[in-house]
Amino acid sequence: MGCAMGARAGEGATRELAVRLHSAALHLLRRLRREDAAAGLSPARLSALSVLVFGGPRSLGELAVAEQVAPPTMSRLVAALEREGLVTREVDAADRRSIRLAATAAGRRILEEGRERRVRRLESMLAGLGAGDLEALSAATALLERLLTEDAAR
């Protein structure tokens, strides 16, 4: 009976940690997202462009799935990105009947500059921490990276 009580207490602690981590991750991303306004693109356009910049060329359908939107919605987003010179359509080398969407150099530059702004903001937040806190955060980050890698492998 003692083991069952201990297991339930551990489950409660795991649940509480999950709730706190979820909240902290959302707040951190919202805080860093404020830096995205400097890019001059809507969050939806930035997100779609990010998939193409950091994930490589995709079909319209693949991009819609990655962004969890309907293909007509993605068509409108891509058309706007094309008008702005941030995305191009390329014939798929493996299947000449298919079209792949790819980020242009200008699209890559916008995303790289945005990432740099967010990293600088996060760096300024971290600058106020002591060495012990930085080490603890580094260890926690390594653990999160491992959890994400393991989850992706499932």
Image (cartoon, rainbow, N blue to C red):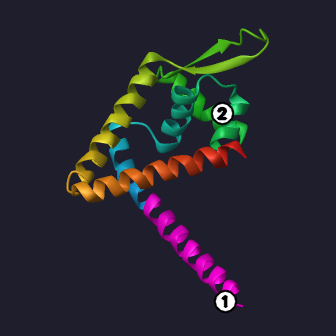
- Circle 1 residues within 10 Å: few <14, some 14–19, many ≥20: few
- Circle 2 residues within 10 Å: few <14, some 14–19, many ≥20: many
Q: Which residue does the image show at 64% across and 36% down from the upper left?
A: 74
Say if mark 1 contacts mark 2, CB within 8 Å.
no
Q: Which quadrant: the N terminus?
A: bottom right
Location of residue 24 with respect to 80 vertically, above or below: below
Location of residue 102 with respect to 114 vertically, above or below: above
Residue 103 numbered mark, or none:
none
> Which residue is label 1 attached to?
2
Residue 26 x %, y %: 46, 59
Which element type, helix, strand or loop, lies under badge 1? helix
> Which residue is label 2 attached to?
63
Q: Specify the quadrant of the image occupied by residue 57.
A: top right
Front-most of residues 75 and 67: 67
Q: Which residue does the image show at 67% across and 19% down from the upper left?
A: 100
Q: Identify which amino acid the numbered label 1 is placed on.
A: Gly
Nearer-N-terminus badge (1/2): 1
Front-most of residues 54 and 111: 54
Q: Which residue does the image show at 68% across and 37% down from the upper left?
A: 64
Distance, label 1 to label 2, CA atoms, is 51 Å
Residue 135 x %, y %: 32, 53
